[in-house]
Amino acid sequence: MELSHRSKEYEEVHQSAINHLKQLLNIPDNYQVLFLQGGASLQFSMLPLQFLKKGKVANYILTGAWSEKALKEAKLIGETKIAASTKENQYKSIPTLSDIQLNNNDAYVHLTSNNTIFGTQWTEFPDISHAPLIADMSSDILSRPIDISKFGLIYAGAQKNLGPSGVTVAIIRDDLLNENVDHVPTMLRYQTHAETNSLYHTPPTFAIYMLNEVLSWVNQQGGVKEIEKQNIEKAKLIYDAIDESEGFYKGHAEKEARSLMNITFNLPNEEQNKRFLTKAKELGFVGLNGHRSVGGCRASTYNAVPMEACIALREFMDSYRKEHS
């Protein structure tokens, strides 16, 4: 924490984190890895500042609260459109590829790959050729292999799968760094950070050190494919508890849109939700409350959550149902 970000010792950590990320995600050579600050929330403003030029439209696919927030910030910068939305069904699903409305004057098309609040996740990404596809992958990056070449820009706050909060990863295609951004403040330009290897100013050095440690751990686990296998097994334990409960537990997300990272569900009534969460807390389960905006229950199964925790939750869900149904 005390090392200078200009020191040789820190430089090795910094570059190691970049190299690990490139290897684990199979990032093509024509992409840059940037370490930024401000979380995904700053990216909501930073990307339209770069790419939403006059006469162009920012096209957003709405699948939950975070995509809504991204759209809200873009509206402050320029013209926007909604390419598709599942808000009308309470964000229980992901739009089909045929539902996405594209425009010739799209500056970019934006999506959120995983929706933490509603428990849905993209399983297949659209092929966009007329404009960059940009994705907020804060809550599921590194949880499964992805084809980076489908995207012009991917950004992710670290605090779900990459490490502690404080660093934001951006993966950007080289051609997007050629945009004229003379109107954009220096610190809000992707070029600024690309040209200086994310060392234009003091980066969050300890968060990047921890990121590098997490990436080393993922590598030791067998890489992203092995992590995905584990995540599928973990999520299945809990989804099976829901599906085999004869309606006692009701999942929020439609089956084909279910997230491997966030499993959202309700019990028969609000009183049962409260009793379940109280008992779970007594037994040592932490963070099972649903997001304050939707209530209910939410089990998050991020990379670092061990299989044993998911087995224990499955057993608790089964025993609680037998006792209270």
Image: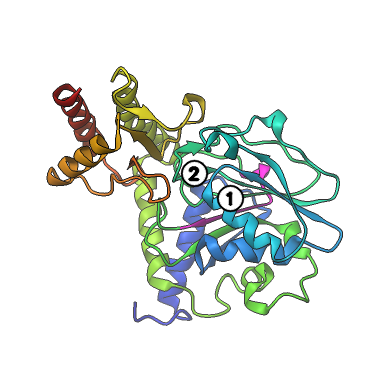
Image quadrant occupied by the C terminus: top left
Image: magenta residue range? 148-157
Q: Picture coordinates of residue 227 (x, y %)?
A: 39, 38
Q: On the rendered structure, is 322 left or right of 178?
A: left
Residue under the point 33% across and 34% down = 266
Q: Which mark is residue 233?
A: none
User: Looking at the image, can residue 121 be seen?
Assistant: yes
The kind of residue tagged 1 is: Ser
Residue 42 belongs to the span the image colors magenta: no
Specify which label sits upstream in the sequence, 1 or 2: 1
Asked if the residues shown at circle 1 and circle 2 are in contact, with their CB atoms under 8 angstroms apart, the answer is yes
The kind of residue tagged 2 is: Asn
Q: Could you tell me which secondary element the residue under label 1 belongs to?
A: helix
Q: Which mark is residue 67?
A: 1
Q: Which mark is residue 115?
A: 2
The local crowd at label 2, few if under 14, some if 14 to 19, many if 20 or more residues have their Cα within 10 Å, is many
Q: Could you tell me which secondary element the residue under label 2 belongs to?
A: strand
Residue under the point 71% across and 58% down = 174
Picture layout, residue 230 above or below residue 191: above
Q: Nearer the viewer, residue 34 or 72?
A: 72
Quadrant location of residue 224? top left
Picture layout, residue 284 above or below residue 121: below
Q: On the rendered structure, is 164 left or right of 121?
A: left
Residue 152 belongs to the span the image colors magenta: yes
Q: Nearer the viewer, residue 166 or 199?
A: 166
Picture layout, residue 175 above or below residue 193: above
